[in-house]
Amino acid sequence: MRCVIARFPFDLIKTEVQDAMKGITPEPVTGDSVLIGRRHYPVKQVGEVITRQDRRDFTAGEVTRALTRLGFTCH
């Protein structure tokens, strides 16, 4: 699925996001979160991993919209 995060286009696939987050320890959730597998990750942490951008460069809303469209459950 094509999406734009911080003005950069990305082609995201649900399985690639899941693979990218394997082995990564979730940080404490203080705001928006996403359920990947059986773990809750902060949306900003996932965004940083999948875009390879600094988390200050994008909003949680941008990543939440993209992850929701991929079929992930966001809280």
Image (cartoon, rainbow, N blue to C red):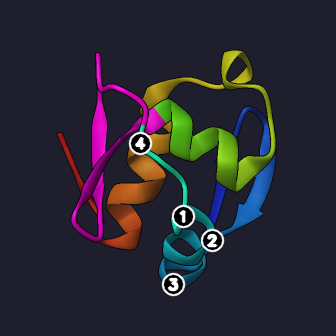
Among the 4 quarters of the image, the one containing residue 53? top right
Judged from the image, the secondary structure of the residue bearing numbered disc 1 is: loop
Q: Amino acid at mark 2?
A: Leu
In percent of the image, x 67 and y 49: which residue is there?
A: 49
Q: Which residue is mark 2?
A: 12
Residue 1 x %, y %: 58, 75
Q: Nearer the viewer, mark 2 or mark 4?
A: 4
Give the position of the C terminus as an image quadrant. top left
Q: Amino acid at mark 1?
A: Gly
Find the distance from the CA under tag 3 to the CA under tag 2: 9 Å
How would you rate the neighbour count of disc 1 (Cα within 10 Å): few for under 14, some for 14-19, many for 20 or more? few
How would you rate the neighbour count of disc 2 (Cα within 10 Å): few for under 14, some for 14-19, many for 20 or more? some
Q: Which residue is mark 3?
A: 15
Find the distance from the CA under tag 1 to the CA under tag 2: 19 Å
Q: Which residue is mark 4?
A: 26
Residue 27 x %, y %: 43, 31
Is residue 70 left or right of 56 when viewed as pictured? left
In percent of the image, x 51 and y 84: which residue is there?
A: 15
Query: Observer-nearest residue: 25 or 21?
Result: 25
Indicate yes or no whether the magenta region holds residue 35.
yes
Judged from the image, the secondary structure of the residue bearing numbered disc 2 is: loop
Among the 4 quarters of the image, the one containing residue 68? bottom left
Find the distance from the CA under tag 3 to the CA under tag 1: 14 Å
Among the 4 quarters of the image, the one containing residue 58? top right
Q: Which mark is drawn over residue 23?
A: 1
Above/below status of 23 relative to 29: below
Q: Which residues are magenta?
A: 27-43
Q: Which mark is drawn over residue 4?
A: none
Q: Nearer the viewer, mark 3 or mark 2?
A: 3
Find the distance from the CA under tag 4 to the CA under tag 1: 9 Å
